[in-house]
Amino acid sequence: MNKREYNILVTNDDGIDAPGLLALTQAMERIGKVHIVAPDRQQSAVGHALSISNPLRVMPFWKNGKKFGLSVNGTPSDCVKLAVSALLESKPDLIVSGINHGQNTSVNVIYSGTVSAATEGMLLGIPSIAFSLANFSYKADFSSAEEYAYLIAKNVLRTKIPSDTLINVNIPDLPLEQIKGIKITRQSNSIWEDYYEKREDPFGREYYWFSGNYKIIDNDIEADDVALSNGFVSITPLRLNMTNDKFIKKLKNFEKLRL
């Protein structure tokens, strides 16, 4: 197949004007025809939220005098569902989400709008990848992440991905020559030790600001956080089914309970 035969939907959770989205778009343009449908504003940590009681409005977004894509006043999952259901002429061959400003490893995949957009793509039966860079700054250098996004997406298109699986990619914030390579990883068991700071606005009114510290508690190089912190690109296949199969047998006695 030549590159023009692939249709690729690009979205994110940092908003349509985020530098990471531009980097991902540039990477995907080397593979096929790109369609951008992304939130019109920052939507980090919205998880898999869908807009079910608000109308979704779609507007063309222009960058440097040219039409760049379509912005939606909704969540990342809204963007994917709306694009595939109503905005695109045909089903895309691939959905990519990112490149997120900040890693989405371990427990972060639950909160991540970036990962949730890819999850929605998987639910729609389309191979989907979430890309994240381990740097939260909007001034981050996405050049290494762009190259790995191209490399990985190109090879995902050549690979049969299980229908219940999406690909989660995290890229270290390093120059290309310092990245040690790729590790296929599992989700780590890291946790957030979070809290809310009580603050006061200029008018003397109290408010709360979310804060916290991220604690890596794994030491296995095959865990996503550990691989990433050791300079590797982490690729984790994620599934939607969160059933604890090992615990089912221990709960079987509950079936005997009666009121």
Image (cartoon, rainbow, N blue to C red):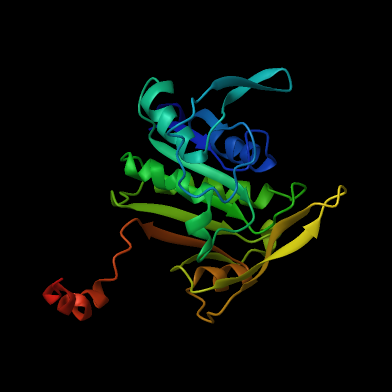
Q: Nearer the viewer, residue 52 or 68?
A: 52
- Look at 52% across and 30% down and name the residue there: 37
216 and 78: which is toward the camera: 78
Question: Is residue 128 positioned above or below 238 on the image?
Answer: above
Question: How many numbered marks appear?
Answer: 0
In percent of width and height, residue 24 lies at 59, 41
Residue 200 screen position, x and y as percent: 82, 56
| Residue 247 in view | yes
The x, y position of residue 255, in whole percent, is 14, 73
Residue occupying image coordinates x 63% and y 42%: 14
Q: Residue at x 44, y 28 (%)?
A: 83
Q: Quadrant of residue 63?
A: top right
Q: Quadrant of the C terminus?
A: bottom left
**82 sits to left or right of 44:** left
Visible residue check, residue 31: no
Looking at the picture, does residue 93 appear above or below residue 231?
A: above
Q: Nearer the viewer, residue 29 or 227?
A: 227
Position of the N terminus, as image quadrant, is top left
Residue 142: give x, y in percent of width and height: 68, 48
- The residue sitting at the right extreme is 202
